[in-house]
Amino acid sequence: MSEHGNSGNKKWLVVVNPNAGTRKGKKDWPKIQELLSKHDFNCHTVFTKNRNHAIALTSSAIEEGYRDIIVVGGDGTLNEVVNGVFRQNVCAPADVAIGMIPVGTGNDWGRMYGLPKKYKKAIKVIRKNYHFTQDAGFVSYHDEEGSHERYFINVSGMGYDALVALKTNRMKDKGRGGTMAYILNIFTGLYQYENIHFDISVDGKDVFSGKVLSMNLGICKYNGGGLMQVPNAIPDDGLLDVTVIKAISKFKIIKNVTKLYDGSIAKLKFVNTYRGATCRIVSRPQGSVYLEADGESLGHSPLEFSVIPKALKFIIPEPETTE
């Protein structure tokens, strides 16, 4: 579903993560602010102070009446804003329009829609206010405090994928993130990760039981700064695309790294793919499978995934029409 809106005299909530893109958010905010002003945006700006702060900021602003949001940050900031949209109780999530000015390092959600990385062009996209309504993923997981829930709009990963995300997030917290950090951790993580036994069911049917290197569930296609581990994902089909990379040797992993970037990884014999509206993952030993969603490191198994069809409204570049 798509539509044009009118950005006109709306009051926009702008959620800025100063630490996004290894503090690029802070450095570039004056330039972005000037461009927003130049394009006549009426903005109320809030700045995140710590991890998950954008969830509370977004939820509170919606309860105050805001329905149009601009995210100035990366995929993690966008994920927090999405969770804030879901956690308020005054309107349907799809009543809120979300635009993005990417300043993160991966910007994988925007890659799905061809969102410009140039600030001026990204602001022009928001100004045109073309809406696309996509699905959202939902996952319940556990940690030492009990069970929790998280929404995601891009890709969730487990096993080796979650380890790489965790290592990269720790580097980001120390100001040493970036795409190169992710690539570095792809290789260094190989010497830390041990294959884990997964029991996987999709739509209530047992589909796999065995040792797994890595697993991804996608609403959209890209993660990890351009990896395409769920290459057939469609963001509004009401389904999760599931990719399971079975236990293989470290040599075989390194040999096939490039296939993670062009989507051909899904065609290899040691990779299984599935599609469904729900997915359950249990590990042996229990709790040994760790989770990331939209690049954010969360908790561990058992994990329950589901899809909320056409749940959120995003501002994206208007598709080119052919006659």
Image (tube, rainbow, N blue to C red):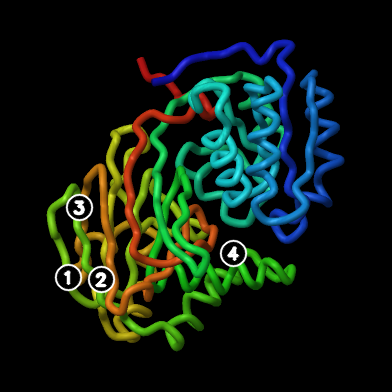
| Residue placed most toward the observer, 262 or 316 | 316
Q: Is residue 103 left or right of residue 80?
A: right
Quadrant for residue 66, please give it: top right
Question: Do the numbered discs 1 and 2 sit on residues whose CB atoms are within 8 Å?
Answer: yes
Q: Amino acid at mark 1?
A: Ser
Work out whether mark 4 precedes mark 3 in sequence or the reverse, and give the earlier one: 4
Q: CA distance from mark 1 to mark 2?
A: 6 Å
Q: Amino acid at mark 3?
A: Val
Label 1: element kind? strand
Q: CA distance from mark 2 to mark 4?
A: 29 Å
State the residue position of label 3. 202
Q: CA distance from mark 1 to mark 3?
A: 12 Å
Residue drawn at (58%, 70%), measured in percent from left and top?
Answer: 168
- Please name which of the two marks, 4 or 3, marks the residue nearer to the observer: 3
Q: Residues within 10 Å of mark 2 (few under 14, many from 20)?
A: many
Q: CA distance from mark 4 to mark 1?
A: 33 Å
The picture places residue 51, in percent across and down from the top left corner, at: 67, 56
Does residue 8 sit above or below 44 in this rendering? Answer: above
Q: Which mark is residue 209?
A: 1
Quadrant for residue 209, please give it: bottom left
Work out whether mark 2 precedes mark 4 in sequence or the reverse, and give the earlier one: 4
State the residue position of label 2. 198
Question: Do the numbered discs 4 and 1 sit on residues whose CB atoms are within 8 Å?
Answer: no
Residue drawn at (75%, 47%), measured in percent from left and top?
Answer: 48
Q: CA distance from mark 2 to mark 3?
A: 13 Å
State the residue position of label 4. 179
- Please name which of the two marks, 4 or 1, marks the residue nearer to the observer: 1
Work out whether mark 4 precedes mark 1 in sequence or the reverse, and give the earlier one: 4
Q: Residues within 10 Å of mark 3 (few under 14, many from 20)?
A: many
Work out whether mark 1 precedes mark 3 in sequence or the reverse, and give the earlier one: 3
Does residue 72 sit above or below 25 in this rendering? Answer: above
